[in-house]
Amino acid sequence: SPLFSAIEMAPRDPILGITEAFNADQNPAKVNLGVGVYYDDNGKVPLLECVKKAEAILMEKFAPRTYLPIEGLAAYDKAVQELVFGADSDVVKEKRAITAQAIGGTGALKLGADFLQRFTPNSEVWISDPSWENHRALFESAGFKVNSYPYYDAATRGVNFAGMLDALKAMPEGSIVLLHACCHNPTGADLSDDQWTEVIAVVAQRNLIPFLDMAYQGFGDGIEADGKVVRRFAEAGGALFVSNSFSKSFSLYGERVGALSIAASSAEEAARIMSQLKRVIRTNYSNPPTHGGQVVATVLATPELRQLWEEELAGMRVRIREMRTAFVSMLKEKAPGHDFDFVIQQRGMFSYSGLTKEQVGKLRDNNSIYAVDTGRICVAALNNKNINNVIEAITQVL
Ligand code: PLP
């Protein structure tokens, strides 16, 4: 048909392309540092004990699979809202927050984007430079013009905070600012508490609309510490959008569990917002799936399982930290002229390693070690078995 013959091939997803090349590689010593997934020390995606136990409880019930409400399982939405804002926060106690179950963190972002497009179509969106590779395309596909604000400073391997703040100060009122709540993807470079204080003040002064993306709560400094920035924004008042994901923190990637929360200034306003958000959901996919939400709700609402989850999540966080420390100390020994100390300061699963595109190419061609061309490596893909090879190979390309 002429309709189809005019369609061009879309560009390949660069990160999924790495995994395809990795899968086709026959070298038994191959390592994929290009992924965005947590692997345990055996190189496996874990199935958490808390998830197994929650699934056993759910299995025994043999509950019928009716439709969930449009906004998702009530117990899930409540537990997530309390996790995101804090159960004792004013927004929760005053019923000024709404939370809707979403199809992963991506689905939460898309719900927020579609909602904002309905009510503030002329606002422009600002994302960090660089950002998660899907942010731009996602907001563009919702109809927004997407700009970027300075973020990563290659020279200091940290945040170009002055540049970021200047950009925030120059944004038109009502601009939508996408911020990574913790564990910045792809750089691993986060703002300090004091820097957040300044960002929160500018966002309020300039009437910007903050949209916090929290895909890694618990991977930085802990569940509470990582979530603090959301609470601080909520306390500052004003409109606030928060997308969160349990893909990583529950190791439930394929179950697609996330949520969109919005903080409003009154319970009455929140009710109006929820009624409109439900229309967005209804016209997209009607209502979310049951299983993942039930698992997470069961874990969060059952004290022993919640305790277990917090321990297992801490285990993942600590293991990544250990790999950061090992990476730095091994390189210090093997390549003494090079400073990788910044890798310890970075947070979450990723590190902008400082490796160039050329070096990444050599690692792939000579050693079957796969990383993203930008030098992003997934620290959570390192383990005690592969780290020696990785360090040896990096030493050769430096
Ligand atoms: N936001 C960021 C910053 C991410 O890194 C990711 C996943 O890698 C997501 C959102 C999407 O999360 P999900 O896989 O739950 O859709």
Image (cartoon, grey):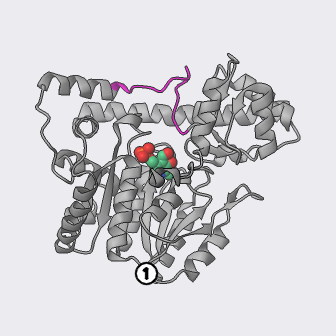
Residue nearest the viewer, comparing 320 with 35: 35
| Residue corresponding to mark 1 | 207
How far across and down, in percent of the image, does residue 8 sit?
Answer: 56, 52
> What quarter of the picture does the C terminus occupy?
top right
User: Would you say the magenta stretch is mainly helix, strand or loop?
Assistant: loop
How far across and down, in percent of the image, does residue 274 sit?
Answer: 21, 64
Q: The residue tagged with tag 1: helix, strand or loop?
A: loop
State the residue at coordinates (80%, 40%).
Answer: 359
Q: Height in image: 270 above or below 81?
A: below
Residue nearest the viewer, comparing 202 with 107: 107
Q: Height in image: 235 above or below 88?
A: below
State the residue at coordinates (66%, 43%).
Answer: 344
State the count of labels.
1
The answer to if 41 sits in the magenta stretch is yes
How far across and down, in percent of the image, does residue 62 sit?
Answer: 12, 25
What type is the residue that disc 1 sits on?
Asn
How far across and down, in percent of the image, does residue 165 sit?
Answer: 60, 74
The answer to if 239 sits in the magenta stretch is no
How dense is the environment of label 1, judged by Cα within 10 Å: few (below 14), some, or many (20 and up)? some
Residue 115 shows up from this direction: yes
- The stretch of residues the image draws in magenta is 36-49
